[in-house]
Image (cartoon, rainbow, N blue to C red):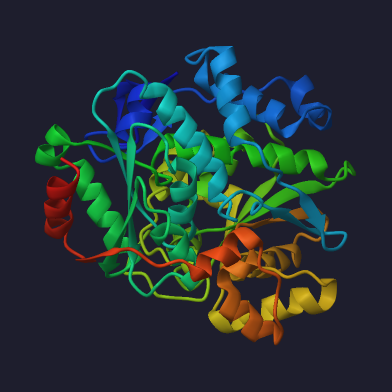
């Protein structure tokens, strides 16, 4: 498997280099040189395969023999070991539950797969690998759980102070061991900018083996494509078009779905659902991409004002014969944005109509799917429910006016002591801390 940078398609990297470096030197993002199409027989008979068999088939096709079969199967077995069930709300609307992993968020799929893949490629290295990651909510907890006590790794998680839920914060600040949390006095965009600058700093990279665990790392993105296939196999085969509605922040989840589509999965359309941080819906409407500082909302994991994976989205639609990149993208993706007031009403609506407790991010997806299906009624729509509602306990219980169930593995965190290092939102402060602590 070869990969190129979205900023320079001539300079190629191996899968190992792309996974362990995270970012190319030119600050682009790695993309597969080739996205193979899976056999039609496999796609027509997905229900005959287990989730792990589907994951292996997809990964093996993309990796093109770089990892031997026995090793790749072990990576899949160790990482994709929890379900992704589809729950039906009504004849048109379905929910794909992606919160059955250890941190109760969809990012468990990517983080656990990445941890196994990095561990595989890191064998025999003498220096520790330092995984640097920014989080707006769920990424940090998933990465912390995925890499916890993984030999040869140190994990450093940057998160915006006061802008993640209490239980989300506890997931990344209470493990200890090889997991360190940096509480940044700023926004998620500040955290992400600091991480990107670290990867491009020659001095840091000379003394520390840095890599990323955000969706900017291709090894996070690839396993997120697996559950699109797993969801599709669970839907009724009734001839209606299938659309996926993706609550979106950094847009890695939607990009992974587009890769699944390119591999042959018959997804008719994508819906990009955002809160008021709506730079991508604005682009789909106007053709102008205008990043801006993020605004804090109820659906905090989507509080991203400059989504990194937008560069990959552009890359996937460049050079297609039909029309411009913008026209190609808006033919395939519709964008919708909603306020916190609308989100709260949607959480209550789903509970009232279907007896289903949905989290604020899934609620934004629910609103976007309903808006799309007003003009496309003959479709099956799948909402990606990206986190367990109990991760937003205070907000969801306030909306519903009652207590909701909290899984035990999350409930025990509330009693644990937070351990975090407070940093100003300046790269110089991060660099100084890394050189002092990790070099």
The quarter of the picture where residue 388 lies is bottom right
User: In which quadrant will I find the C terminus?
Assistant: top left
Q: Height in image: 31 above or below 247?
A: above
Front position in the image: 116 or 191? 116
Instruction: Judge by depth and name the residue closer to the eye, 254 or 19.
Output: 19
Drawn side of residue 217 relative to residue 391, left or right: left
Look at 47% across and 55% down and name the residue there: 141
Left or right position of 30 against 56 = left
Residue 231: give x, y in percent of width and height. Answer: 73, 44
The residue that appears at 64% across and 30% down in the rendered structure is: 55
Residue 6 drawn at (x, y percent):
34, 36
The answer to which quarter of the image holds residue 12 is top left
Residue in front for this viewpoint, 398 or 180 = 180
Asked if 50 appears above or below 418 in the picture, the reply is above
Q: Quadrant of residue 232?
A: top right
Is residue 242 toward the left or the right of residue 307 in the image? right
């Amino acid at each position: 498997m070869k990969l190129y940078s979205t900023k320079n398609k001539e300079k190629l990297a191996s899968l190992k280099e792309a996974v362990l470096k995270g970012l190319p030197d030119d600050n682009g993002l790695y993309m597969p040189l080739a996205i193979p199409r899976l056999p039609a027989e496999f796609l027509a008979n997905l229900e005959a395969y287990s989730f792990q068999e589907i994951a292996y088939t997809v990964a093996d096709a993309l990796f093109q023999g770089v990892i031997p079969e026995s090793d790749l199967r072990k990576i899949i077995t160790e990482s994709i070991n929890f379900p992704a069930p589809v729950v039906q709300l009504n004849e048109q609307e379905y929910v794909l539950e992606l919160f059955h992993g250890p941190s109760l968020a969809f990012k468990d799929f990517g983080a656990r797969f990445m941890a196994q893949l990095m561990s595989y490629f890191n064998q025999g290295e003498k220096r520790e690998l330092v995984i640097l990651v920014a989080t707006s909510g769920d990424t940090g907890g998933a990465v912390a759980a995925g890499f916890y006590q993984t030999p040869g790794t140190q994990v450093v998680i940057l998160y915006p102070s006061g802008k993640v839920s209490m239980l989300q914060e506890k997931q990344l600040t209470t493990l200890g061991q090889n997991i360190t949390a940096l509480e940044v006095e700023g926004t998620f965009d500040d955290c992400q900018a600091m991480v990107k600058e670290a990867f491009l700093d020659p001095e840091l990279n000379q003394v520390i083996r840095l890599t990323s665990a955000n969706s900017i790392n291709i090894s996070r993105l690839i396993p997120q494509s697996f559950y699109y296939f797993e969801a599709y196999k669970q839907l009724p085969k009734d001839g209606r078009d299938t659309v996926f509605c993706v609550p979106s922040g950094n847009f890695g989840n939607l990009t992974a779905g587009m890769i699944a589509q390119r591999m042959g999965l018959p997804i008719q359309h994508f819906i990009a659902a955002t809160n008021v941080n709506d730079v991508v819906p604005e682009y789909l409407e106007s053709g102008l991409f205008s990043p801006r500082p993020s605004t804090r909302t109820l659906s905090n994991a989507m509080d991203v004002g400059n989504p990194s994976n937008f560069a990959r989205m552009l890359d996937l639609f460049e050079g297609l014969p039909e029309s411009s990149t913008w026209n190609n993208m808006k033919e395939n993706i519709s964008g919708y944005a909603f306020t916190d007031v609308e989100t709260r009403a949607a959480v209550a609506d789903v509970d009232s109509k279907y007896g289903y407790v949905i989290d604020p991010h899934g609620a934004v997806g629910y609103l976007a799917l309903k808006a799309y299906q007003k003009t496309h009624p003959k479709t099956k729509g799948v909402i990606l429910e990206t986190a367990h509602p109990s991760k937003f306990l205070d907000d969801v219980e306030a909306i519903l006016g009652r207590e909701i169930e909290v899984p035990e593995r999350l409930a025990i965190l509330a009693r644990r002591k937070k351990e975090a290092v407070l940093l100003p939102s300046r790269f110089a402060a991060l660099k100084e801390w890394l050189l002092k602590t990790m070099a």
